[in-house]
Amino acid sequence: MFRTVITAFKIFELVSGSSEAVFNLIGTSRGLTIPTHMSRELLIDPRSRSTRVYSSYPTNPRDGVRLLNVVTADGAFVSLPLTQQCEPLRESDVRAYMSITPGSSFSAYFGNAMLLPPSGDHSTFRLMAGSVDPGAHCDGGTIGYANMPGDAISFNVQASLVAATGRTLEDSEATTQTQSQRTQFGIRTDIESSIIPFELYTRFVDELLAVAGVPDQDALTDLDWSTFIDRLPSIQYTVYRSDDSSEVVARILLEPREFIEFLPMGPKARLLPSVHGNQCSLGLNALKYIGLFLDYHNSRIGFCEPL
């Protein structure tokens, strides 16, 4: 169950140069893609500032600026001028990338954007851009804002384990840490799993083994996780206003059934440790429970419980 302590969009007919759009995002094995007039995939990229497209994409005949024609939810086109941080791709590249970070062409053109998860009325993730009223898409109209410094989608988080009702976390010889140090998190739309601090990931694995009553992870494959999944700890992401503030703007609590998937080859916890320089991030498995508002003009990011 998703909980926070804080948070019908009319689709307009669009023409080139419009600053309002709603996009239905298509989920693929490589991430969330945005429809275009081209046959190749165009993935949204929340990490790189550079938009990477093919040299064959059309240009404006008057000023020679390359255009990225993207398709809205109602089948209209928006011609996005790629005037900032655009890198050309070879025609042999199998996919292109549209940056949605601060400082990108997308952010300059639209000014704000909101990423909403699938719901009863919408079967896909949606990306709304330009003139978005975030409160209209949040439970109770409430939304909590954190600073989004620099040119990255980044926010300050403390991740922690929360014991199941009626339980305490098991003692562990490996580590007793149940919450991480505060650190900067990003978002990932190309992987299901969230990336959490290494020490917290290790503690979760210790808890999983203790609850399952097995000595190592290899022994988990033959177990019926449904018999003990409700005794596993939840993952909580506490979002702060900024890295030097103690003000909490959102708490995102995911229970085990919301980040553990029962796949044909067996159960899988959608968690990864932050190693080898991988930034801690919320993956698609967490993003499907929250609404995110990117306020580029004011350098902030909003979190809410979506309708």
Image (tube, helix red, strand yellow):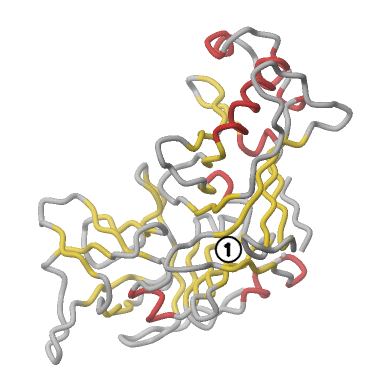
Disc 1: which residue: 292
Work out whether 168 lies above or below 107: above
Instruction: Choose top left, top right, bottom left or bottom right for residue 71.
Output: bottom left
- Place residue 226 in its image quadrant: top right
Quarter of the C terminus within the rendering: bottom right
Q: Is residue 230 left or right of residue 225?
A: right
- SS for callout 1: strand
Rendered residue at 53%/20% (across/down): 266
Q: Position of residue 137 (x, y in %)?
A: 65, 69
Q: Is residue 256 left or right of residue 38?
A: right
Residue under the image location 44 percent in, 77 percent down: 21
Residue 157 higher or lower than 172, as above or below: below
Q: Which of these two is toward me, 135 or 26?
A: 135
Query: Can you name the residue that lies furthest to the bottom here?
Result: 62
Q: Residues within 10 Å of mark 1 (few under 14, many from 20)?
A: many
- Quadrant in the picture for the N terminus: top right
Q: Pick the residue in front: 216 or 158.
A: 158
Q: Residue at x 57, y 71 (%)?
A: 300
> Residue 151 placed where, x, y %?
42, 68
Residue 267, how many percent across, how many down?
Answer: 56, 23
State the image quarter where residue 6 is shown: bottom right
Q: What amino acid is at disc 1?
A: Leu
**Toward the viewer: 75 or 84?**
84
